[in-house]
Image (cartoon, rainbow, N blue to C red):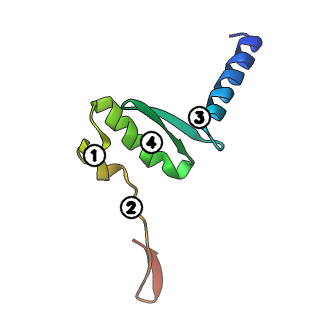
């Protein structure tokens, strides 16, 4: 791939991201049923994974089995015998 082709591809992709309202990086556009959706931020990667599961299975997000498995469990810092541990 030539440098010129790379620069043109970057411009086109950037223009499309701006048109879709991407506020920055990382931004992910997922073509979902009849429309697309923009996901922004590394803390949204579990939502991107869920959307991709939905698209790959051809079902709405609400119908994806075991969707809860992609949502990260929040760890809590709690005291145990005078020490703080993550659970």
Contact? badges 1 and 3 (CB < 8 Å): no
Of the numbered discs 1 and 3, the one sitting upstream in the chain is: 3
Percent from the top left, x then y, of residue 75? 43, 67
Disc 3 target residue:
20
Label 3 SS: helix
Q: Nearer the viewer, residue 45 or 76?
A: 45
Mark linked to residue 62: 1
The residues tagged by marks 1 and 3 sit, at their Cα atoms, a distance apart of: 24 Å
| Nearest to N terminus: mark 3 or mark 2 | 3
Element at label 1 = helix
- The disc, 1 or 2, on the residue closer to the chain's N-terminal end is 1
User: Which numbered mark, 1 or 3, is in the foreground of this view?
Assistant: 3
Across and down, in percent, residue 17 comes to 62, 32
Front residue of this view, candidates 76 and 31: 31
Task: From the image, tell me which residue sits under label 4.
Answer: 48
Q: Which mark is residue 51?
A: none
User: Which callout, 4 or 3, points at the residue further toward the start of the chain?
Assistant: 3
* Pair 2/4: label in front: 4
The residue that appears at 64% across and 25% down in the rendered structure is 13
- The image position of residue 5, as x and y in percent, is 71, 12
- 2 vs 37, left or right, is right
Quadrant where the C terminus is found in the figure: bottom left
Pinpoint residue 38: horizontal percent, then vertical percent: 52, 40
Neighbours of disc 2 within 10 Å: few (<14), some (14-19), many (20+): few
Location of mark 2 (residue): 73
Q: Residue at coordinates 27% horizontally, 35% vertically from top-left? A: 59
Indicate left or right for 72 with 68 as reference: right
Q: Upstream in the sequence, badge 2 or badge 4?
A: 4
Q: CA distance from mark 2 to mark 4?
A: 16 Å
**Alpha-carbon span between mark 4 and mark 3:** 16 Å
């Amino acid at each position: 791939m030539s440098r010129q082709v790379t620069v043109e591809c970057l411009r086109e992709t950037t223009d499309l991201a701006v048109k879709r309202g991407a506020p920055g990086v990382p931004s992910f556009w997922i073509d979902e049923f009849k429309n697309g959706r923009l996901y922004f931020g590394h803390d949204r990667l579990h939502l991107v994974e869920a959307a991709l599961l939905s698209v790959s299975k051809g079902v709405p997000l609400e119908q994806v089995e075991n969707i809860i498995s992609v949502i990260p469990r929040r760890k809590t810092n709690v005291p145990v015998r005078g020490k703080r541990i993550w659970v």
